[in-house]
Image (spheres, grey):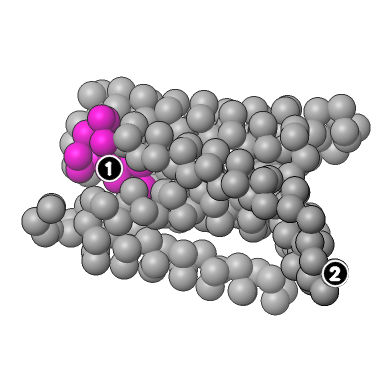
Amino acid sequence: MFNLGWGALFVLVNFALFLMCYRLFGKQGLYAWVAAAVVLANIQVIKTIGMFGLVMTLGNTMYGSIYLATDLLNEKYGEKEAKKAVWFGFFFLLMSTAIMQMVLVFEPQETDFGQPALETIFGLAPRIALGSLTAYYVSQFLDVKIFSKLRNKFPSRNQLWIRLNGSIGVSQMVDTLVFCTIAFAGEYAWDIWWEIVLTTYLLKFVISVASTPVIYWARSFKFKEA
């Protein structure tokens, strides 16, 4: 029960900080958010929690906010800016993975106590690292493309919820399937694998629906872009 209440607060804090980042720093703040979120989500995913009798990983809220940022960029500044943010996030994910893998190779001093913790957090198995990079690349560009197509079909300002949830709904399913296939296929029995896929996707989709009022609010922000 504690995790449910704390989880709701966690989601609200994530959304509040997202709005603050955009309000304070404008379009550049969205790029910064994507870069920070892609790294933090891959750290959080290491921790598992129990909720509704199911085992879940953290990171879904932070990862879902990346779609929120790229869709907001697409909505207000166009598809080109959204794609730029995707490449920005991909670079930071690749950069942080490469640098931290090199950090782990250094031989620690005898009194060092950080190496085991760093290995736990950043010592990603090759399949998980590859799954994360591939899923991000495929799903984010797919989200941008679907959002743009839905904007052509549903152009009204009041139809933003269709563009948002339609693009995220499809792209996050692809993201989940790609990541779980690369990272976990063959590691678990297929019934367990499907349970991981379904619970991960459902949690992501619930968070994306909950983010709908956030993007409506953020879209109303008016300021001069540098």
Say which residue appears at 79% left-offset and 61% top-offset.
Answer: 108
Find the residue positioned furthest to the left. Answer: 224
| Residue designated by label 1 | 73
Compared across the picture, whether 194 is left or right of 169 comes to right
Mark 1 burial class by Cα count in 10 Å: few <14, some 14-19, many 20+: many
Q: Position of residue 26 (x, y in %)?
A: 22, 56
Q: Secondary structure at mark 2?
A: loop
Tag on residue 110?
A: 2
Read off the magenta span: 69-81
Residue drawn 72% across the image and 74% down it: 1
* Mark 1 residue element: helix
Please give the name of the residue rendered at 67% of the width and 31% of the height, measured from the top-left corner.
Answer: 130
Which residue: 61% across, 74% down?
A: 6
**Residue 76: image location, x then y, percent:** 20, 43
Q: Compute the Cα span from label 1 to label 2.
A: 48 Å
Give the percent coordinates (x, y) of residue 41: 58, 53
